[in-house]
Image (cartoon, helix red, strand yellow):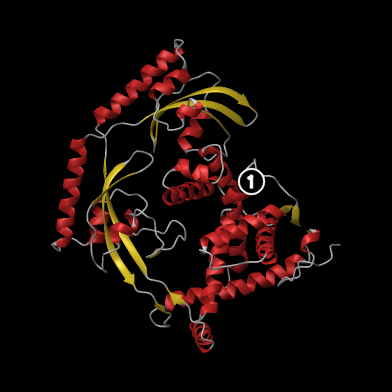
Amino acid sequence: MMQSKTKTLKNTSIAFALFLAGLTTLNAQEKIDGVAVVVGKNIVLDSDIDKFKQEVELRSEGKVKISNCEMLEELMQQKLLAHHAVIDSVVVSQSEIDGRVDRSIAFFTQEYGSEEKVVEAYGFNDIEDLKKELARVQKENLLIEKEQQKITEDIDVTPEEIRVYFKGLEEKGELPEIPAEVVLNQLILKAEPTQEEVDRVINKLKEIKKEIEEGASFKLKAIINSEDPAVAQNGGKYVITKDSPFIKEFKETAFSLDVNQISEPIKSAFGYHILQLHKVKGNQREVSHILMQPQISDEKLKETKEEIEKIVAEIKEGKITFEEAVAKYSEDEETKNSGGLIVNPYTQEPSFELTRMPPELYPRISELNKGDLSDIYYDETREGEKMYGVILMKDKTDNHTADLVQDYVRMQQFALAKKKEEEIAKWTKEKIQETYLKLGNDYKDCTFKKDWKKENK
């Protein structure tokens, strides 16, 4: 049993370490010490291996140890998939990359407490540098995932295969331990600014725009008025391309302006902006912006809280189900159409391990049983949205050894994953023979599971 648990932990830790690739290896200040391997047009550096190993050990709390050769083979597998994804013309959209970047930033911010601490932890100059590297990492991750999906798209498992897989683990004493998990649904009401407040902000931005056009300094106006946290460092100025991980409205406006032109106020999830284009250099735009966010009054917050209290009372009295209340009242676009289901931002699964969940979420639900409602809570986003919410403990399971009936869906996933893994191993064996590979001298004595040492023609 311990062998199975360790293997699962190792695979999970390695996957997360690979996700952090760009954050731990592409910091421009890092000294590069040599090439460990070339796979097609992709390279793995000696420094990559050390840093990935450290990340694995950190994420597993020291429970998983992995050798340099094992780590290198994991990295070669990823680079092989990425290489052939490009050859196979796998398409990754900018919107997919941007969505992943936003979720990654949110996840790391939850772990470290603030964006500034995330930037500091991974050694970047600012949040935009971090987003740029995350975009590169996530693009490669998406290429790898889509190539794996392409290889395994026709793979499925029958009930008999699931039963045989489970019995095989049971006979070897390797049934996995299933951790305590919860499924959570939420209902969110947002406190919106009044129209008068929105009009005030828009008019203020129009006034600032006129003053700048009449000769005032954009940078000075940004420092005085902008609510962009980075304004103190950059005066509101950014250099972007169409691929930069900026919000859609910002990029579209930046690329629609003439040099020195100032935009009319535009709306985004962060508030209202005016932009000025300073310079065009190839596909780059040097642009400044001023961000202002409409304020939400205490009275509006009080009204929103009283409204959600009435909804919760109706749910508790049985006048409406939680799911019906979500469909009727909730203002969270991501969960409104799924009964309020909260998706795990890391695994993208509809469940959370009880001991591994966002730190702000755990205290809200830790004492709940299945079917319970949390206390009403207040929250606000980095974009400035303010809201009240309530959580339903939709399901809760205790830590236990896997059972075929109780954990059938999970065992189906495990069996399917094993079958897909076997198919990818078969694909890898074939592709190694037709892909350029060059191992560094320090790794030629490694013992690999696959024939990575084949002679290149």
Kind of element beneath mark 1: loop
Q: Residue furthest left?
A: 317
Instruction: Where is residue 416? Give x, y as percent.
Output: 53, 74
Give above or below for 215 relative to 174: above
Observer-nearest of 26 and 423: 26
Q: Residue furthest top?
A: 214
Q: Is residue 40 visible?
A: no
Instruction: Where is residue 24? Give x, y as percent.
Output: 60, 50
Give above or below for 31 relative to 294: below
Observer-nearest of 101 and 179: 179
Q: Decide: few, some or many residues near mark 1? Use Cα within 10 Å; few <14, some 14-19, many ≥20.
A: some
Q: Is residue 442 visible?
A: yes
Give above or below for 117 relative to 59: above
- Amino acid marked by disc 1: Leu
| For residue 352, side relative to residue 70 (left or right) | left
Quadrant housing the C terminus: bottom right
**Count of number-bearing discs:** 1
The image quarter in which residue 405 lies: bottom left
Instruction: Where is residue 234? Give x, y as percent.
Output: 51, 27
| For residue 196, side relative to residue 433 (left or right) | left
Q: Residue furthest bottom?
A: 171
- Residue name at image x 34 percent, y 53 percent: 360
Identify the residue position indicated by label 1 in the image: 26
Instruction: Where is residue 179? Give x, y as percent.
Output: 41, 72
- Residue name at image x 50 percent, y 50 percent: 100
Q: Residue furthest right?
A: 457
| For residue 452, side relative to residue 101 (left or right) | right
| For residue 230, side relative to residue 137 (left or right) | left
- Residue name at image x 17 percent, y 42 percent: 303
